[in-house]
Amino acid sequence: MAKLAAAIPPVSALPIAEMLESMSQKQWWNELTAAQHTKIKHESSGLVTELVAMGQSRMAIGEHLSAIQEVLEPMGAFTAYVHDYFYFSLRTAYRWIAGWKNAKNNLSDVVLREAMAVGMNIMGESEDKPLGIYTEAVATTPPPRNATPETARKWLVRIDEYRKESHPRTHVETAPKPVSDMEPLLRETYLALRRAVRRIPPGSRGEFVSHIVGMLIGEFSFRVITKPQAVPDDWIKRRGRPRAA
């Protein structure tokens, strides 16, 4: 499979030309010297290029992490991999993975590139808001088919206007709801322990788990008060027909 981030074409000169044309109509532009005009043009071009590169980097990070996760998480080793070799949290790793998957599944390369060029944060990191603050707008106004840079930019303007009209008091992106850092680690630990328990004869499983919990209590000196709990439905891939509600 071709790398998604690498497949996005480099930013064209067209959006920069449009930007500079718009700037020339501003009052402050007329107050600049010729040397300052040259500097603004040069730095604006560099800024757009770097914004696209930053967006591509963000997606590439998520793509690489997703490929690593596919191999290591079934073994229960993905959390240790992130903690041992990198200085970002497991939660951040999952956010990058989700952002890449949501971008890949919902937006074309051309639309993504044009959004990156203006620093538009349209790559969401959750299932309920796969396109972030623009999820509702995109559901109402889907992206153009076979988008060109021009049609993509016009569409981005429309969905941004829709968002502002729908949420006039919140024109800036609000902070995401806090997500517990424990859930990814709980899931990975549970799945690893589940595989081990399934290999133990049914009559010895309680003793096996008691030994593990006892050793943890002995090392870390904490209290345990527990009761049976349901496993979240999305933690285990079940074969066959879906269970009845």
Image: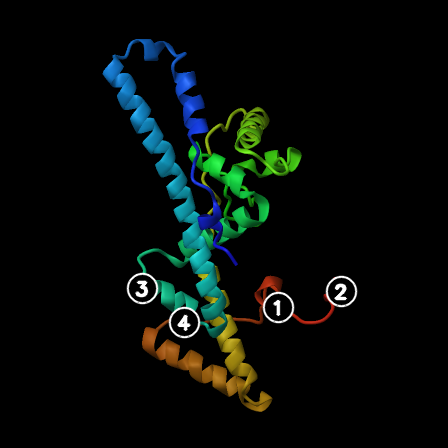
The answer to which of marks 4 and 3 sits earlier in the sequence is 3
| Label 2 with label 1: CB-CB less than 8 Å | no
* Residue 123 image point, x, y percent: 50, 43
Q: Secondary structure at mark 2?
A: loop
Q: Of marks 1 and 3, which one's residue comes earlier in the chain?
A: 3
Task: Estimate the spatial distance between the alpha carbons at disc 4 and disc 3, rounded to whole Å.
Answer: 31 Å
In this view, the residue in front, 231 or 135, is 135
Label 1: state its secondary structure: loop
- Residue mark closest to the camera, 2 vs 1: 1
Q: Position of residue 182 (x, y in %)?
A: 44, 60
The answer for how far apart the CA atoms under marks 1 and 3 are is: 29 Å
User: Which class describes the residues within 10 Å of circle 1: few (<14), some (14-19), or many (20+)?
Assistant: few
| Residue 101, position as x, y percentages in the image | 53, 52
Q: Which residue is mark 3?
A: 85
Residue 129 coordinates in the image, percent (x, y): 56, 44
Label 3 sits on a secondary structure element that is helix
Disc nearer the start of the sequence (4/1): 4
Q: Spatial distance from mark 2 to mark 1, Cα to Cα?
A: 15 Å
Mark 4: few/some/many CA within 10 Å (<14, 14-19, 20+): few
Instruction: Tell me, for residue 237, which label it has, or none.
Output: 1
* Front one among 65 and 15: 15
In the image, which disc is placed on residue 223?
4
For marks 2 and 3, give the CA distance.
43 Å
Q: Residues within 10 Å of mark 3 (few under 14, many from 20)?
A: few
Amino acid on which disc 2 is placed:
Ala
Identity, as a three-letter code, of the amino acid under mark 4? Arg
